[in-house]
Amino acid sequence: MFYTYAYLREDRTPYYIGKGNGNRMFVNHKGRRGTVIKVPSEDRILVLKENLTEEEAFRHEIYMISVLGRKDLGTGILRNQSDGGEGATGHRKSEDWKKNQSEYLKKNNPMYNKESLEKMRKSQTGKKQSKETIQKRKETIENMGGVKLTEEQKKKISDSKKGRKFSEEHKEALRKAWKKRKGVL
């Protein structure tokens, strides 16, 4: 089932009309021109109509936008950037689109680019985290009930470490770290 909703300004006038289902009205919206319509506090979200079919919700959205008008067209008070009635509920990306997007990201997103990843790694190498940061991380893990691995996860981790060769320098650094953690040093 679908619904229409309005985001309200502090003076309770609407500034955005939308159509959705599920938790759509609680999710920031990306506008056509790269703008973001941020979700206001719950007391400034108004459900206009509910229990609608998608077609009914589209029609109501179009109606409300036409009645209240759009700021960008100089016809009213809404920040909507379209007349409504469009959307892609349940839209699935094609395998070709996914492949093209993956290739694009590998070339342009630093998280996929080996050179950028290496620069980021080097920029963090040798930096020490504060005791506060370490303590906060420990507390977070404890509050989550600790990190519990399944037997399968434990086995995968163990298998991935078998047969690795370490330099003597690295082995010595591991020994020192272990002793320091155990309070031997």
Image (cartoon, helix red, strand yellow):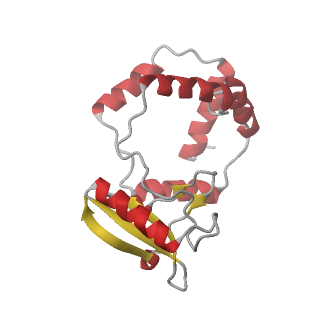
Which x, y percent locates residue 107? Answer: 66, 25
Q: Residue furthest bottom?
A: 11
The residue depicted at 53 percent of the width and 57 percent of the height is: 82
Q: In this view, does 4 lie above or below 133?
A: below
The answer to which quarter of the image holds residue 113 is: top right
Nearest the viewer among 23 and 184 is 23
Q: Which residue is drawn at 37% across and 57% down?
A: 58
- Picture quadrant of residue 106: top right
| Residue 173 placement (x, y as % from top left) | 65, 30
> Residue visible at 50% across and 73% down?
68
- In the rendered image, residue 15, in percent from the top left (x then y), is placed at 54, 72
Tell me the quarter of the image containing the C terminus: top right
Up-down relation of residue 58 to residue 16 (above or below): above
Whether residue 66 appears in this view of the structure is: yes
Quadrant containing the N terminus is bottom left
Q: What x and y, as percent, mark residue 134?
A: 58, 53
**Is residue 79 depicted above or below 121 in this figure?**
below
Give the tally of numbered discs: 0
**Residue 91 or 101: which is nearer the viewer?**
91
Vertical position of residue 84 compared to residue 159: above or below = below
Q: Is residue 157 left or right of residue 10?
A: left
Residue at image position (65%, 17%) is: 167
Q: Does residue 23 show up?
A: no
